[in-house]
Amino acid sequence: MVVYTGSMSDAASKTFYLETFGCQMNAHDSEKVVGTLLAQGYRQVPTVEEAGLVLYNTCSIRDKAEQKVFNRLADYKKYRAQGKKFGVLGCVAQQEGERIFERAPYVSLVCGSASYRNLPQMLVQLETGSSRVTGLDDRMTDECFETEFAARTNPHRGYITIIEGCDKFCAYCVVPFTRGKERSRTSASVLEEARQLADLGYTEIQLLGQNVNSYRDPSGLKSFAELLVAVASVVGIRRVRFTTSHPRDFGRDIVEAIDAVPALCNHVHLPVQSGSTRVLDAMSRLYTRDEYLERISWIQAARRDISLTSDLIVGFPGETEREFEETLSLMDLVGYDSVFTFKYSPRPNTPALRLEDAIPEAEKARRLAVLNDRQKQIGTRRNQRHVGQIVEAMVEGKNAARGQWVGRTSQIKVLNFTVPAGVELAAGSYVDVRVTGCFPNSLVGELAV
Ligand code: 5AD
Ligand code: SF4
């Protein structure tokens, strides 16, 4: 963990500890929250014991994730007597709201992500003794959390949020209720941040949004694909990624942009969730199996070899064995490079709660295992095509135990590779690696000299 120390003035008294759960959006929100606290004179400390203010940036995408924060809070009850303050941020905060004060009365700050821009005022309220401070925006705000203070933890790959919130309301998903309505930043502001990152030495940028490709420039200047090209054209930027794309808003122009601009990584994450049109309809995903496959055909027709990854849910209410098999057959047809797989988890407020969650846990687990097994075979096959190729990797670090270096390809594949004796590489540098073998989820190779 990177721990930032702010200015020395109030440093002794104002200390905070922050733990983050969940997705990349949350991780980057935390970078901005840390930056905001530092600007307010706080100092980040690495343990709960040392902190005056303990913050959790929470995730509620599945029940298991939500439970984690309540377990943490229960563990730390003992610190209440020491006068520590606790704050719950993020999706569980927005979802549970003031109920958190009832479940954990020693919590004094509850703030959803759509209210982070008000954090400085909330911190002042906390400091002046308020015992229950809330920032709970119920899909009202049109504003983004833009701050110059992000305390980035990775010195080479910089994250930039371009769109917040979600308006899709997929039947299973809590996000539209926790992250507010969709709101995009202007392309000028995104490009300004990209230039700042390049000036600081960043070479990779990842554009973030719950539905990144639903981006609508409020100034009307650029489409999403045009924004991708513009960010990739910033001097010093060698790689641009974006996540997560929604199939409904996935246009051919995105593929054309990747084909035309080498700095746009040749990887698309396009969650399908299910291979059955009936289930997709019940999930309110706004596309059919065939429409999804059409988008895949655009990507596969590209001149560049674009890797494909996806999210899949098994055991959505009413999913029959035959419908589950349609997901398997879709995986075969697409040939994903890798997938994230989940068992359906009923979430508060979501439309799917009205459907009976009747598929037993053991059956969900079986379907999940079948799916993961299938992906192991597909992933290995997909990775075999790289064996013998020379690919460019961004060096991420060294696995001392295995005596190997770890890098990532433009296609977002993990590549473990050896280097000749005595050679040391710098994290963040780019090297050519000859691929000599593969596993379902990674490649192995040797530095090409
Ligand atoms: N149950 C299981 N998986 C879910 N996801 C979102 N909501 C749920 C849920 N209620 C998965 C989807 C989404 C990913 C981020 O999490 O696959 O794409
Ligand atoms: Fe959730 Fe669907 Fe929005 Fe993704 S698009 S965040 S799955 S509601």
Image: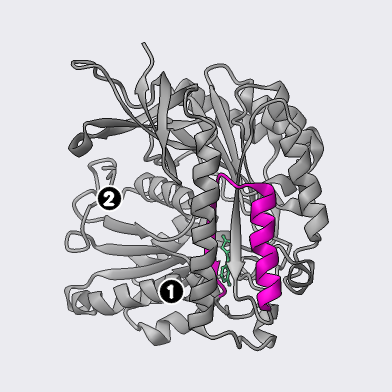
Residue 173 in percent (x, y) is at 63, 70
Quadrant of res 108:
bottom left
Q: Secondary structure at mark 1?
A: helix
26 vs 89, nearest the viewer: 26
Quadrant of res 330:
bottom right
For mark 2, what is the residue?
Answer: 44
Where's the C terminus, which quadrant?
top left
Residue 401 falls left or right of residue 251: left
Looking at the image, residue 226 lies above or below residue 122? above
327 drawn magenta: yes
Instruction: For residue 64, say whether it is visible.
Output: yes
Q: Secondary structure at mark 2?
A: strand
Residue 36 falls left or right of residue 227: left
For mark 1, what is the residue?
Answer: 64
Cα separation, mark 2 vs mark 1, equals 27 Å
Instruction: For residue 112, say whether it is visible.
Output: no
Color theme of the render: one colour
Looking at the image, residue 205 lies above or below residue 133? above
Numbered disc total: 2
Residue 98 falls left or right of residue 332: left
Residue 194 in percent (x, y) is at 56, 29
Residue 272 in percent (x, y) is at 68, 57
Image quarter for ligand 1: bottom right
Tell whether circle 1 marks a residue whose Cβ is less than 8 angstroms from ligand 1: no
Local crowd at mark 2 within 10 Å, few (<14), some, or many (≥20)?
A: many
Local crowd at mark 1 within 10 Å, few (<14), some, or many (≥20)?
A: few
Q: Amino acid at mark 2?
A: Gln
184 vs 318, nearest the viewer: 318
* Part of the protein shown in magenta: 320-344
Looking at the image, residue 209 lies above or below residue 79? above
